[in-house]
C-alpha cells in the first residue's frame, strides 16, 4: 500500500480530522509514528494546504522533533512552508546537527526576519552555526541594534554565562515605586523580553542591588518603593562556565538571575528555561563520555560516528593488550590447572562491573559538587569498604559454587581471595581515577572508564594467578 493511500485513509477517518492535535502526539507527548508518513506524503505530493494543516497541529518544539525524523531532502522541501515567526521558534529547539542542515536551505532575508523574533541568546546560537558567507549576509540584513546584540554575545566564550544569557532585561532605579514600574512596563511593552520573572533594581552605575519579582509587583500597593519589596540576588559573572551556572540555579532554586560584567554592571539575564537545556546537554555529554562516545545524535553521519568511537576502542585495545601480558609468566601453571582459564574472565568481569559502579557514583558526585576535599577521605573509605564487603559476598558465592563443582577447597579459597582483591582495586580505581583527573583539570567522565577497565583486568588476572601460584603450587 502506498504512502499516499495510507494518508488518504487517515484523512478519511473522522476521529483523526476532528482532533488532529490529539492524534499528532502520543500520550507521553512524543510524536505519533503514524504522523510522520502523513507529513512526508504531503511533501511528496506538494500539497501545501495539507502540509499547513498538519504543521498547524504541532507546537514549534514538536515541529523541531519532526525535523529529526525527516530526511535531509524532506527537510529542504519543508523549510519554505515555515513563516519567519514559526521558523524562529523551531530553530531555537533544533539539535545542532539538524539546525545546521536546515539553515543551509533558509534564504538570508527570511533568516534575518526569524532572528528578529528570537531572544539574543538564541539568535547568537543560530548565527554561530552559519557559514561565514551566509553569516555576513544575514548580519548585514539585521537592524543595527539586533546586530550589535548578537555580535556582543558571540564575543563571549562558548558555554559561558555570556553566551547563555539574553541581553534583554527589565531594570528600574531603586527610588521608583511599584506604580511607576508597572506604568513603565505597560508603556514599553513592545521592548520587553518575551519571558521575564524579575525587575532588576539598579543603582546609578547600572549595578544590580536587588530584584523585584513580578509576583511581588502585582501584590504591592502602587506607592510602595521597589527598595521595600526587592529581594537579594545571586549575580552570575559573565565568564562563568554554564555548568557552574546550572549548579547555582539548582542550589538556590532560582528562576532567573542577573548577569554582570567584571565591573559589576548588569549586562543580561539567565532564565530557568535556558538552564533546563544546559542541564540536559551536560548530562548527555557525561553519559556519552563515560561510554567513550562524543556524538550519538540521530542525524549524525556514519563516518562521524566512527571517528568519535574508534579512538577509544583503539585505546582500550592497547590497555587490554598490556593487561593480558601479566598472564604469560603463569602459562605453565594454567596448563596444569585448566579451571583457571574459566575463572579469569569471571574475576575480570565482576571487577569491571564493580569499578563502573564506583566510577559512575564518583563522576556524578563531582559533577554535582557533592565530592570535594572536605569529604573525599570519607567517600573513598566508604567505597573501599563497600568493595571489600561486596568482594567477600561475591567471592563466597563463587567459591562455594566452585567447591560444589570441583571439590577443591584450595581452588575455592584462591577464587575468594582473588575476587576480594579485585573488587577492592575496582573500588579504589573507580573512586580515585575521577578525583585525580578532576584535580588535573581533565573531564573525569571522558577517560576514567578506560583507566578503571585496565586496572580491573590487569589486577584481576594478577590476583587470581598470583594467589593460585602461592596456594596451589
Image (spheres, rainbow, N blue to C red):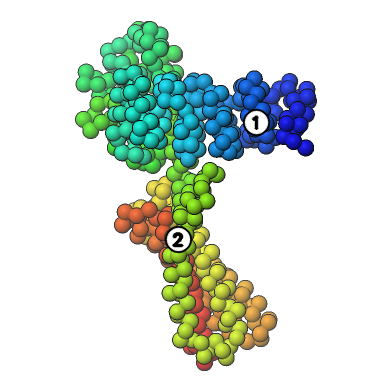
Give the residue at mark 1: 44
Q: In the picture provided, is 334 more to the left or to the right than 239? A: right
Q: Is residue 50 visible?
A: yes
Q: Is residue 164 visible?
A: no
As rendered, which of 45 and 94 lies closer to the eye?
A: 45
Q: Secondary structure at mark 1?
A: helix
The image shows residue 50 at horizontal and vertical percentages of 66, 22
Residue count near mark 2 (Cα–Cα under 10 Å), binned few <14, some 14–19, many ≥20: some
> Residue 9, labelled with which disc?
none
As rendered, which of 185 and 181 lies closer to the eye?
A: 185
Q: Secondary structure at mark 2?
A: helix
Residue 75, quarter of picture: top right
Quadrant where the N terminus is found in the figure: top right
How many marks can you see? 2
The image shows residue 59 at horizontal and vertical percentages of 58, 26
Residue at point 43% right, 35% down? Answer: 275
> Residue 312, labelled with which disc?
2
Residue at point 50% right, 25% down? Answer: 87
Q: Residue furthest front?
A: 45
Is 289 placed above or below 350 here?
A: above
Residue at point 21% right, 18% down? Answer: 204
- Label 1 or label 2, whichever comes before in sequence order: 1
Q: In the picture provided, is 142 more to the left or to the right than 44? A: left
Residue 161, quarter of picture: top left
Amino acid at each position: 500500500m502506498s504512502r499516499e493511500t495510507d494518508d488518504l485513509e487517515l484523512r478519511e477517518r473522522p476521529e483523526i480530522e476532528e482532533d488532529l492535535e490529539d492524534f499528532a502526539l502520543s500520550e507521553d507527548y512524543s510524536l505519533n509514528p503514524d504522523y510522520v508518513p502523513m507529513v512526508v506524503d504531503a511533501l511528496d505530493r506538494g500539497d501545501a494546504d495539507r502540509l499547513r494543516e498538519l504543521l498547524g497541529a504541532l507546537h514549534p518544539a514538536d515541529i523541531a522533533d519532526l525535523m529529526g525524523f525527516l530526511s535531509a531532502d524532506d527537510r529542504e522541501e519543508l523549510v519554505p512552508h515555515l513563516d519567519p515567526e514559526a521558523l524562529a521558534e523551531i530553530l531555537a529547539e533544533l539539535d545542532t546537527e539538524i539546525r545546521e542542515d536546515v539553515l543551509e536551505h533558509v534564504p538570508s532575508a527570511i533568516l534575518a526576519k526569524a532572528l528578529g523574533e528570537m531572544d539574543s541568546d538564541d539568535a547568537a546560537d543560530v548565527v554561530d552555526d552559519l557559514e561565514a558567507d551566509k553569516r555576513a549576509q544575514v548580519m548585514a540584513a539585521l537592524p543595527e541594534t539586533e546586530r550589535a546584540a548578537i555580535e556582543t554575545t558571540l564575543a563571549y566564550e562558548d558555554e559561558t554565562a555570556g553566551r547563555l544569557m539574553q541581553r534583554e532585561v527589565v531594570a528600574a532605579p531603586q527610588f521608583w515605586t511599584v506604580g511607576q514600574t508597572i506604568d513603565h512596563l505597560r508603556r514599553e511593552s513592545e521592548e520587553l523580553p518575551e519571558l521575564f520573572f524579575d525587575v532588576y533594581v539598579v543603582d546609578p552605575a547600572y549595578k544590580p542591588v536587588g530584584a523585584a519579582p513580578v509576583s511581588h509587583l502585582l501584590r504591592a500597593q502602587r506607592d510602595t518603593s521597589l527598595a521595600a519589596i526587592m529581594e537579594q540576588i545571586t549575580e552570575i559573572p559573565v565568564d562563568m562556565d554554564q555548568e557552574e551556572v546550572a549548579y547555582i540555579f539548582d542550589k538556590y532554586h532560582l528562576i532567573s538571575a542577573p548577569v554582570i560584567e567584571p565591573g559589576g554592571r548588569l549586562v543580561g539575564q539567565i532564565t530557568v528555561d535556558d538552564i533546563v537545556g544546559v542541564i540536559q546537554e551536560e548530562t548527555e555529554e557525561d553519559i556519552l563520555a563515560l561510554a567513550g562516545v562524543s556524538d550519538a545524535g540521530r542525524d549524525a553521519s556514519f563516518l562521524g560516528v566512527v571517528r568519535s568511537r574508534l579512538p577509544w576502542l583503539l585505546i582500550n585495545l592497547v590497555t587490554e593488550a598490556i593487561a593480558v601480558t601479566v598472564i604469560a609468566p603463569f602459562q605453565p601453571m594454567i596448563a596444569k590447572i585448566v579451571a583457571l582459564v574459566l575463572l579469569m574472565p569471571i574475576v575480570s568481569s565482576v571487577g569491571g562491573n564493580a569499578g563502573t559502579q564506583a566510577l559512575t557514583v564518583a563522576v556524578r558526585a563531582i559533577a554535582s559538587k557533592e565530592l570535594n576535599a572536605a569529604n573525599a577521605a570519607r567517600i573513598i573509605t566508604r567505597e573501599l569498604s563497600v568493595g571489600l564487603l561486596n568482594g567477600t559476598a561475591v567471592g563466597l558465592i563463587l567459591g562455594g559454587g566452585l567447591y560444589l563443582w570441583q571439590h577443591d577447597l584450595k581452588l575455592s579459597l584462591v577464587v575468594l581471595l582473588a575476587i576480594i582483591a579485585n573488587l577492592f582495586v575496582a573500588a579504589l580505581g573507580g573512586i580515585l581515577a575521577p578525583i585525580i583527573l578532576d584535580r588535573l583539570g581533565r573531564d573525569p567522565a571522558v577517560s576514567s572508564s578506560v583507566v578503571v577497565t585496565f586496572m580491573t583486568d590487569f589486577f584481576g588476572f594478577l590476583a587470581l594467578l598470583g594467589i593460585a601460584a602461592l596456594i596451589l603450587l
